[in-house]
Image (cartoon, rainbow, N blue to C red):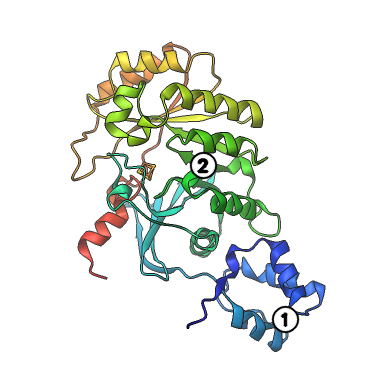
Amino acid sequence: MTHVKEDILGLMPNEIIKELADMGEQPFRGKQVVNWLYKGINSFGAMTNLPKSTRQKLESKYKIGSLKQIDRQKSEKGDTIKYLYLLADNNIIECVVMKYAYGNTLCLSTQVGCRMGCSFCASTKEGLVRNLEVGEMVAQLLIANSDIGRAEDRGIRNIVLMGSGEPLDNYQNVIKFMRLVHHPDVFNISYRNITLSTCGLVPKMKELSQEDIPITLSISLHAPNDEIRRKIMPVASAYSVDEIVQAGKYYFEKTGRRVTFEYSLIHRLNDSEENARELAYRLKDFSCHVNVIPINEIEGTPYRRSSEYRIESFINTLKSLGLQVTRRRELGQDIGGACGQLKRGYLDNVEI
Ligand code: SF4
């Protein structure tokens, strides 16, 4: 039987230090390994201040990441770079770097596919293939970081878990990933700079509220009521809009972090003034934020982009009713802006 090596990128620094100690190494060796790992090296051989015997021991048990970049596309404006990675089992995932004035943001995937079935989403076409391992999420950050760092001398400062997959459906791995990237010896990314997007898995949202990880929670609502929501999001049959808003309030109470509701505007489905009024009613008395996203049209779906008039009138109605609203800056439309679109386009064109 082939020995499958464990990915060392999935371990917390204390686990690496303990592992080295268990191998009979001196205490500072573990710390040396941790220092090397996030510099973008991809072999233990490159850890030149470790004795050869230590490197060999590590080599026999561990690998450093398993992602291979197979595509990289930059938008015309240069504000978005999309990466496609091949996993060890030949699955493909994607991540996107978006450039904002406040720093580079990485949108990464947490699962191969997704089982939530949102009808406007390209990630859901094949259902859930599998959860990503912690190391596979870390590797997306490492590779993008070294690419951006090389190109522009600025690394990733913000992470959004909004690529393919429902992060709370891969709960344990995602929690560990967030603790890991926050660790001062790893990427030292503030929890405030991590945003997790969920389609509204109420029990997991409550669990997350208790983790002492005060990240930004972003809830994909996309509808003002259950009837419309059920048309586009099967998860609406499991949890009602009211339950989701309550869970959002609970998250805010526990963490003090303001919750964002994502609302993708779809032409004549959820973009009327009446829809805006109902949404405002649901969110009244809740100090939250609404992010309105005019959808990118996705081939193979019936959904069309709302007219500029309807977009503006929807946003203005929400504002007039006291909600804090922003319109999401639309980045990289020329390379496929919605989650799963790049991968979809690639798979449609390439035989692997
Ligand atoms: S929108 Fe998000 S939760 Fe819905 S199917 Fe796509 S990846 Fe899954």
Image mark for residue 49: 1
Outermost residue to the bottom:
52
Compared with 69, 159 (above or below) is above
Of 258 and 228, which appears nearest the observer? 228
- Tell me which corner region of the image, top left, top right, bottom left or bottom right, holds residue 34: bottom right
Of 240 and 265, which appears nearest the observer? 240
Q: Position of residue 165 (x, y in %)?
A: 41, 49
Q: Amino acid at mark 1?
A: Asn
**Circles 1 and 2 in contact, beta carbons < 8 Å:** no
- Tell me which corner region of the image, top left, top right, bottom left or bottom right, holds residue 344: bottom left
Residue shown at 48% from the left, 13% from the top: 322
For numbered disc 2, what is the local secondary structure? Answer: strand
- Tell me which corner region of the image, top left, top right, bottom left or bottom right, holds residue 230: top left
Compared with 82, 20 (above or below) is below
Q: Position of residue 240 (x, y in %)?
A: 41, 25
Image mark for residue 207: none
Judged from the image, the quadrant occupied by ligand 1 is top left
| Disc 2: which residue | 196
Q: Amino acid at mark 2?
A: Leu
- Say if disc 1 is inside 8 Å of ligand 1: no
Q: Position of residue 55 (x, y in %)?
A: 66, 83
For numbered disc 1, what is the local secondary structure? Answer: loop
The residues tagged by marks 1 and 2 sit, at their Cα atoms, a distance apart of: 37 Å
Q: Residues within 10 Å of mark 1 (few under 14, many from 20)?
A: few
Q: Nearer the viewer, mark 1 or mark 2?
A: 2
Compared with 349, 78 (above or below) is above
Q: Earlier in the sequence, mark 1 or mark 2?
A: 1
- Say if disc 2 is inside 8 Å of ligand 1: no
Can residue 83 be seen at all in this image of the molecule? no
Q: Residues within 10 Å of mark 2 (few under 14, many from 20)?
A: some
Of 15 and 218, which appears nearest the observer? 15
